[in-house]
Amino acid sequence: DVMEIHTLELRKLPETVGADGKDGELLDWLRLIRSESEEEIEMLATKTEEMKMTVGRLKQLSEDERTRMLSEARELYLMDEAARRDAAVAEGRAEGRAEGRAEGEARGRAEGKSEVACTMLARGMSIGDIADITGLNERDILSLRQ
């Protein structure tokens, strides 16, 4: 029921963890993402076992050109799929609105014809004349009489 969003700007990361040590692990992960030197990556890999495994897998992936190309292709595929899905949702909403609008207009026209037919019946016009003028069939006009 509750969502919390945190925006973390890599350029604004503090260089050191505060005295209370809070958010140290999160900052280490963000520093890994931001890191530009091999030394910094190696230093971060010593922090936790998960970080060490991640750095090892990252090196493995980046050394193998075929794996790197597959990873990039997968990322592009996922972005394309997300764009197609977003476009389909937007198109579906537009179609739904158009269908709803057309249905509402048709219902409004039918109600308008019924009101006109009721008024004509009240004025004593013949059912045949009412059918000719409104386009309603005689059975529908007779049902309005009741």
Image (spheres, rainbow, N blue to C red):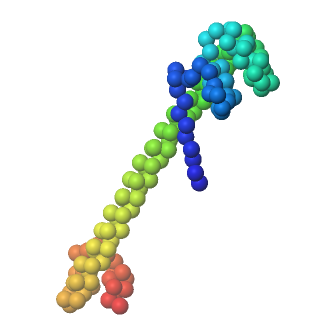
Nearer to me, 50 or 111: 50
Residue 125 in which image quadrant: bottom left
| Residue 122 in the figure: left or right of residue 37 | left
x, y percent for residue 100? 40, 59
As drawn, which residue projects farthest toward the right?
49
Could you tell me which residue is drawn at 52 percent across and 26 percent down? 9
x, y percent for residue 96? 44, 53
Residue 66 in which image quadrant: top right
Nearer to me, 123 or 32: 32
| Residue 66 in the figure: left or right of residue 138 | right
Asked if one can make out residue 146 in the rendered structure from this viewpoint, the answer is yes
As drawn, which residue projects farthest toward the left?
123
Asked if one can make out residue 80 in the rendered structure from this viewpoint, the answer is no
Could you tell me which residue is drawn at 58 percent across and 51 percent down? 2
Could you tell me which residue is drawn at 61 percent across and 11 percent down? 36
Q: Quadrant of the N terminus?
A: bottom right
In the picture shown, does residue 8 fall above or below 35?
below
Residue 5 in which image quadrant: top right
x, y percent for residue 35? 62, 15
As drawn, which residue projects farthest toward the front?
19
In the picture shown, does residue 141 fall above or below 60?
below
x, y percent for residue 13? 56, 23
